[in-house]
Amino acid sequence: MKRLFISLALAGLMFKASAQQQHSSVQQQRIAPAYPLLTHDPYFSVWSFTDGLNTSATKHWTGANQSLTGLLKVDGKVYRFLGGQEESFQTILPASDEKAYTAKYVESEPAKGWNQAGFKETGWKTGTAPFGDGAATTQWRTKDLWMRRTFNLEQTDFKGLKLKLMNDDDVEVYLNGIRIFACECFNGKFIYVPVDTKLLKKGQNLLAVHVRNNVGGQWLDAGLVYDKPTAGTPNVLLAKQTKIALTATQTSYSFDCGNVNLDLDFTSPLLMNELDLLSRPVSYVSFKVKSKDGKKHNAEVYFGASTGLAVNTEFQEVTAKQYKTGQLSVLKAGTKEQAVLKKQGDDVRIDWGYLYVAVSENTRAKQYAGPADEALTSFTTGRTTGKTSTEGKKLMLSTVLPFNQIGTSPVEKHILIGYDDLYAVQYFGQNLKAWWNRKNNQTIEKQLELAHTEYAAVLKKCNDFDQRFHADNLKAGGIKYAELSDLSYRQSIAAHKLVESPQGDLLFMSKENFSNGSINTVDITYPSAPLYLVYNPDLLKGMMNGIFHYSESGKWKKPFPSHDLGTYPLANGQTYGEDMPVEEAGNMIILTAAIAKVEGNADYAKKHWKTLSVWADYLSKEGFDPANQLCTDDFAGHMARNANLSVKAIVALGGYGMLADKLGMTAEAEKYHTMAKQMAIKWMEMANDGDHYALTFDRKNTWSQKYNLVWDKVLDMDIFPVDVFKKEIRYYLTKQNAFGLPLDSRRTYTKSDWIMWTATLADSPADFEKFIDPIYKFATETASRVPLSDWYETTDGKQVGFQARSVVGGFAIKLLDYKLHRK
């Protein structure tokens, strides 16, 4: 969980309805900060960031546009029910994502006037953008960089002029000598800053930038754009959204479209007890149309999927074609380059593999591909301009479904959306295919056919699971807890990729979304674990197998686990710059003990006993009073003598003793159980701060959530007295803010997964709900409209950082405790 702050400039304009619909109201029930639509893995993941499905363009979890569009035509009228108009720009001065460019630069402070026209660039170098470290074309590793870029214009009457900028870190930007932007910040993706058009002039212009690196990576890339004129789609009305519902595997909407009603369902069948289905990269989009006036109507549904789902940047060239396979008509699209596994990082989309939109030939659907800005006009006018094979940029895969003579009984049809990534991850130098094709005996066409054939059966499985999941969470923690659990389910699973290792082990590889992009981070696995302990511990083993292999292969030689296996999707060894010794050793031992508790045996621990013993020995020496180091909450910085980190070590040592006991190692079990109990007694003395326990052993009048204590309770290890839990809970209830319990006394921000763990220490449902209510308030009221953030301010409910992360699987800690202890 990294110390990165990423400023998002989320592109996207609200859909502008026709004049007749300007004042119509859309019922928008707020039940989530963002809504999952297609959710499979860190790349194949599309969300709606607004309550109205038709009021904004759909996006990848990073905020990049990945447009899905839906229209319904009935009685000569066209209604939009899905998607909105993307914000679109035309280029004046390209940034490097569109076209390579060169600029003058210098790394030592230039003379005064460096940002003015006519400045003598003596001693300045010429470099190709972007400038920075890592993947940058021109490497820049010093503290500061100054850049000058001249360009000529024949006209200056651009409407909506904007600076297009990506910078790391602090930056000041000048246009023709006038400062147009300055920020002490890091923007990990392009932002668009309005600029006064009057600053441009005919002839030569100058864009000058100074950027300073403070910490971590460094980057500079800049250009100028202006708003692309958008006439909108004529005669398109805005469908009235009348319902929205969200369950574990499905997001559903209802719309009023004149004389007919439309029900729209997105289903991603992420069922953890069926790994082949879980891995199958196919979602369903289902349409049910019925008459509401008792008369018969002919209708058509248009569904468009942008090739934005298959590119990293909008300027990449793509190819698209339509073909038939078995019972299906299929549209396929992907980049011309197909640079498989060539990109790594956090704010990166996939640009290899292919997007598929498939529909049964029995539906008599029409499919075609063409420029996105022509697709809607083609449908509304009935004059199709798309082709069965084409190439270009910003294409749309279009499917038109006829619904003839619709009456009061609903007629249902569905579309399949799939993505074949060809190779999913690289694991210690070897490229691995996704689990569904691990034996290299499958094709995406076979998977699409199977998904179509099994449609009814899969939907029933999803409905049955959704009902059970909600009911179990309702019993475990109440209605708000159950609704938060529904919201967290797909987000957590879809932050992973399921593959098989060359050794034949299951690997469930996480991406550390919106943080630093690490793959298989141990302190991401730890908070995510409860959901998988409840529904399939093999998936938790899949998160841990790679870490065990890294140590046991000899590639990682330290007496504690690595922090990660690399940067997604390349798992070739740790890339994070610093170890977390106590954190990761404690995490791995605790989770191994939890697997033993759930499965009723210690077989998994036995397989890795030698490695676990090395880690336990390390904790026995270094864990109780931790040295100055990072823990999973590393965004808060280094800290010595961390009382909560000490709890983790103590509980882990108790867990190791529990495992030894299950393996018949009586002496070893007694040794470590006694050690943990004695450490707990000493901990209570050293951390005691009157009516609570302190943040660190040496700082009184401080406090922190001791969320690591929850495993003592859940695993029935009886290391700490119950009075410790009660004392902390009583104190925490005096420290809550409107949107939750702060992480500790240093700041007012919090982590929602840790609140869930802390709340599970409460011995009464009423106290548990007192912690859950503010998290629910955050989820349903936050102004940060992104896939559920786990790091936010408790005072105003605004996101501090992180979104779409797997750690919300930690919400299931209460469900796990309930399942293990219900009578």
Image (tube, grey):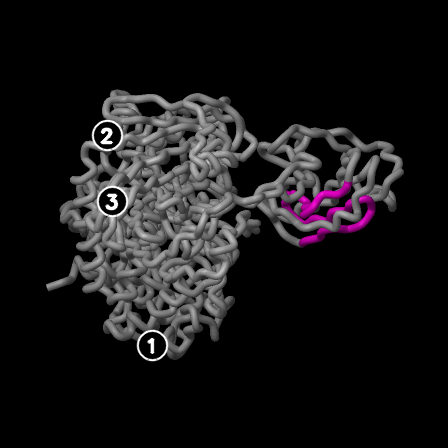
Q: Amino acid at mark 3?
A: Ile
Q: Is residue 459 above or below residue 333?
A: below
User: Which mark, residue 730?
Assistant: 1
Residue 703 counted in the magenta span: no
Secondary structure under the numbered disc 1 in the rendered image: helix
- Label 1 neighbourhood size at 10 Å, few (<14), some (14-19), many (20+)? some
Query: In the rendered picture of this protein, how many numbered marks are placed on residues?
Result: 3
Task: State whether the magenta stretch is mostly helix, strand or loop.
Answer: strand
* Label 2 or label 1, whichever comes before in sequence order: 2
Residue 350 in view here? no
Residue 158 counted in the magenta span: yes
Q: Position of residue 398 (x, y in %)?
A: 40, 33
User: Which mark, residue 265?
Assistant: none
* Label 3 or label 1, whichever comes before in sequence order: 3
- Callouts 3 and 2 close, C-beta under 8 Å: no
**Magenta region, residue range:** 156-183
The residue shown at (29%, 74%) is 767
Query: In this figure, which residue is indicated by the disc labeled 3?
Result: 406
Quadrant assignment for the C terminus = bottom left
The residue shown at (22%, 52%) is 466
Q: Is residue 465 above or below residue 281?
A: below
Which is more foreground, mark 3 or mark 2?
Answer: 3
Secondary structure under the numbered disc 2 in the rendered image: helix
Q: CA distance from mark 2 to mark 1?
A: 63 Å
- Left or right of 372? Residue 615 is left
Query: In this figure, which residue is indicated by the disc labeled 2?
Result: 362
* Label 3 or label 2, whichever comes before in sequence order: 2
The residue shown at (33%, 27%) is 330
The residue shown at (33%, 65%) is 758
Q: Position of residue 14 (x, y in %)?
A: 51, 52
Q: Amino acid at mark 1?
A: Arg
